[in-house]
Image (cartoon, rainbow, N blue to C red):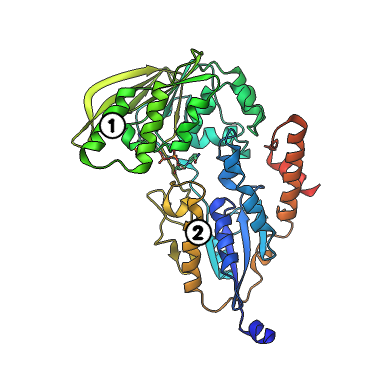
């Protein structure tokens, strides 16, 4: 009986490119789909010398609970059919064509790392940054250590009404000593402690009813110890009336309204640090002499359910602007990007090439969204699999001498960072230098 099973077992080689949440949940879905007739070997390829994607370089340092999902990733990585190939770049160390020729299916879980642009005058002035650069800077991403961040002004503006805007604004507005027990980058913590910023203004172009913040993130705001948070109560009340006039207010929105009202009514502490959320404020121009000095906004209004300009303008004097208005996927040879995503139908790109996560659906959803998304894509892949290829997989493709960070090397890096953290009372101290990361993996 056992022999019969082995003879009938089909064994497929899967390459997953990108070691972020979408990549790991894809690996997990393949692991769960294994049975007596079907098994997989999973090779995960990652450009950086470290895995975990946005859990390492995106999630805010003061949100450690969200990062605990990394325990799930490590469990997936411990399965015998999983191999990590970090420090391997698609298009440079390995071509997409080679991967497609040698693997039964290739899944691109490469995310969306390019910050969208506003396309307005003055956007390229100094001190106008994208969250796509600022977030990895404070999260120790080796490519962003040298991002120029000037915190010498009093007021910063954050464009966008989503959770990334909220993260960025919170990091700028809180007392940096609140970040002492976190894994924020040391270089960022030093700068934040020297920061002159005392007012941070988040500007959303539509009303509170269209804000992309989620209630748990809003609920964090009144808990900030050294920052007063301001939202105009009337803006929330007006938005509530607009929605109530046309339909019942759905649960998530109701929660958002409730928290926003709570924030606006919350007794202020009278502290120096302020975070304000303004709605119906669409940026139309950044002004300044070489560097940002002012942001000009069109004052929007809601008319018959539509957001339109009221014809009025206003300005905010500030020395730093961070745009947190979404992300696009990065192009690389053999891949077409359309509307910021890899061109795909339900995750299928073409032949044996698939995509999942932000690269597939755009930059939406929380980490857990990638789980169901990846499960759907894996089901589709399994439906399409035919005869397994006979090939050696990645080992035949990499140049000899190329230094791969495999699971064991990553575990050494991980342990070293955690030990460095224990010494100073932090969850970890992330190494920021690429070469040093690789040498930690050798030790
Ligand atoms: P997002 O939720 O899509 O928010 C983007 C914001 O930018 C929206 O308010 C959008 O306004 C605005 N925007 C877009 N184009 C604009 C323009 N030209 N001018 C002015 N504003 C513009 O994206 P995100 O904040 O980057 O977050 C990405 C995903 O990651 C989201 O699903 C988010 O929930 C998730 N995330 C979750 C957490 C967490 O769970 N703690 C943390 C960070 C991120 P319109 O709505 O008017 O387009």
The secondary element bearing badge 1 is classed as helix
Q: Going by the image, does 424 lie left or right of 210?
A: right
Tell me the crowding category of disc 1: few under 14, some 14 to 19, or many 20 or more residues within 10 angstroms, Cα based: some
Callout 2: 10 Å neighbours few (<14), some, many (20+)?
many
**Which residue position holds label 1?**
239
Please state which of residues 145 and 410 is positioned toward the viewer in this rendering. Answer: 410
Residue under label 2, please give it.
374
Q: Position of residue 44 (x, y in %)?
A: 62, 58
Ligand 1 placement by image quarter: top left
Residue lying at 57% horizontally and 42% vertically, measured from the top left? 66
Q: Quadrant of residue 31?
A: bottom right
The quadrant of the rendering that contains the N terminus is bottom right
Q: Dot 2 lies on which element?
A: helix
Question: For the point 30% across and 40% down, which residue is it?
Answer: 249
* 108 up-or-down from 65: above or below: below
Q: Position of residue 415 (x, y in %)?
A: 75, 44
Residue at left offset 60%, top offset 43%: 67
52 sits left or right of 119 in the view = right
Discs 2/1, front: 1
- Give the quadrant of residue 194: top right
On the image, the x and y values in percent for residue 426 come to 70, 33
Outermost residue, left side: 304
Residue at left offset 68%, top offset 84% = 2
Figure quadrant of residue 205 = top left
Please state the horizontal and vertical placement of residue 257, each as a whole percent of the image: 36, 33
Res 180 label: none
Look at the picture and state if 343 lies above or below 439.
below
CB of mark 2 near ligand 1 (< 8 Å): no
Alpha carbons under labels 2 and 1: distance apart = 36 Å
């Amino acid at each position: 009986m056992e022999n019969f099973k082995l003879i009938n077992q089909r064994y497929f080689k899967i390459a997953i490119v990108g070691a972020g949440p979408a990549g790991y949940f894809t690996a997990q879905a393949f692991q769960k789909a294994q049975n007596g007739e079907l098994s997989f070997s999973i090779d995960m390829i990652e450009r950086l010398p470290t895995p975990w994607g946005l859990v390492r370089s995106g999630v805010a340092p003061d949100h450690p609970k969200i990062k605990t999902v990394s325990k799930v990733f490590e469990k997936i990585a411990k399965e015998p059919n999983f191999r990590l190939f970090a420090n391997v770049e698609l298009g440079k160390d390995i071509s997409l064509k080679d991967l497609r020729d040698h693997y039964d299916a290739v899944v691109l879980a490469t995310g969306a790392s390019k910050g969208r642009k506003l396309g307005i005058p003055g956007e390229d002035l100094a001190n106008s940054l994208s969250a796509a650069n600022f977030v990895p800077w404070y999260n120790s991403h080796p490519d962003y250590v040298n991002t120029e961040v000037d915190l010498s002004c009093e007021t910063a503006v954050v464009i966008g009404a989503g959770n990334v805007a909220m993260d960025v604004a919170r990091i700028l507005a809180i007392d940096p000593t609140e970040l002492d027990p976190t894994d924020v980058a040391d270089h960022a913590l030093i700068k934040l402690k020297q920061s002159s910023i005392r007012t941070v203004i988040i500007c959303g172009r539509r009303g509170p009813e269209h804000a992309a913040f989620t209630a748990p993130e809003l609920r964090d705001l009144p808990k900030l110890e050294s920052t007063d948070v301001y939202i105009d109560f009337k803006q929330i009340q007006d938005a509530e009336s607009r929605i109530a006039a046309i339909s019942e207010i759905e649960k998530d929105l109701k929660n958002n309204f409730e928290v926003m009202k709570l924030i606006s009514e919350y007794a202020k502490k009278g502290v120096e640090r302020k975070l304000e959320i303004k709605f119906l404020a669409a940026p139309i121009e950044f002004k300044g002499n070489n560097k940002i000095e002012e942001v000009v906004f069109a004052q929007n209004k809601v008319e018959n359910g539509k957001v339109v300009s009221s014809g009025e303008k206003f300005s905010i004097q500030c020395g730093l602007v961070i745009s947190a208005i979404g992300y696009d996927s990065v192009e690389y040879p053999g891949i077409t990007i359309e509307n910021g995503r890899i061109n795909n139908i339900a995750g299928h790109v073409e032949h044996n090439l698939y995509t999942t996560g932000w690269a597939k659906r755009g930059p939406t959803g929380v980490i857990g969204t990638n789980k169901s998304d990846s499960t759907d894509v894996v089901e589709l892949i399994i439906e399409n699999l035919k005869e397994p290829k006979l090939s050696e997989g990645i080992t035949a493709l990499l140049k000899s001498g190329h230094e791969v960070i495999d699971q064991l090397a990553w575990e050494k890096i991980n342990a070293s960072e955690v030990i460095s953290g224990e010494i100073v009372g932090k969850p970890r101290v992330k190494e920021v230098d690429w070469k040093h990361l690789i040498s930690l993996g050798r030790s």
